[in-house]
Amino acid sequence: MPHARYETDGDLGEIVLSNPPLNLFDATLVQELREAVDAAAAAAPRALLLRAEGKVFTAGVDVHVFEGLDIPAADALTASLLELAHTVEDMPFPTLAAVHGLCLTAGLELSLACDLLWATESARFGLVEKVVGITPLMGGTQRMAERAGTARAREFVFSGDLYDAATLHQWGVINRVLPDDEMLDDARAFARALAAGPTRAHAATKAVVRAQADHGT
């Protein structure tokens, strides 16, 4: 069973994390996620849903992926992870992350690279990289600042604490918070509705919003 895969449901594409029990970003998941993201980019569905199987979305990066890396290898891994998030962010169709349970580090950074982020009421979020003495590697700090403001982004990353979905919804990080047993079905229905919409207009909207975020125009 792959740790990450790309699949389709009509005009809707889905990237699925499936590495039980914690959906850790180990070497296999990272490689298969890269392949799934590339498959989604090549297939160009009309909308994309990012979701995970199991009890948690992800407990984050398996720290063993950093063991034994020299500086060039560490730089290559960092560049690969950053490129992964950029590829998702730059897709010219709507992307929606549907998050449940725990969502930490790389999984949260990937979710923040999506256009929209929905969560279950019980979901918990954190960029907890400080516990291993690093800062987030995939643009999570910047995207948190874009959504929540610079002061809250600093607090979120500096503290390394877990934040509930309601707080991040109040901050503007999460678009919708739904009951645990309803969120995925509702998110998939919304993603299907996006897929049925005006593809070129959605791409133009993404470009306009990105220009405003990056340049204020």
Image (cartoon, rainbow, N blue to C red):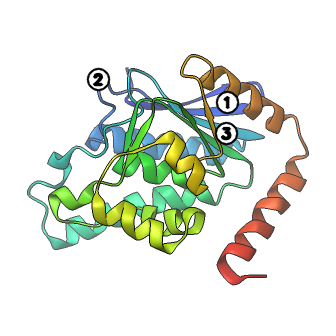
Q: What label does residue 48 carry, if any? A: 3
Residue 45, above or below 180: below
* Nearer to the camera, 48 or 172: 172
Amino acid, disc 3: Leu
Q: Which badge, 3 or 2, is on the more N-terminal residue?
A: 2
Percent coordinates x, y for residue 70 in the rendering: 12, 68
In 3D space, how far apart are the residues under numbered discs 3 and 1 (Cα atoms)? Answer: 11 Å
* Nearer to the camera, 50 or 165: 165
Q: Which of the two marks, 3 or 1, is nearer to us in this view? A: 1
Residue 50, above or below 72: above
Q: Secondary structure at mark 1?
A: helix
Percent coordinates x, y for residue 57 in the rendering: 42, 33
Residue that numbered label 1 is attached to: 187
Query: In which quadrant is the C terminus drawn?
Result: bottom right
Q: What label does residue 21 carry, if any? A: 2
Amino acid, disc 2: Pro
In 3D space, how far apart are the residues under numbered discs 3 and 2 (Cα atoms)? Answer: 24 Å
Residue 75, above or below 126: below
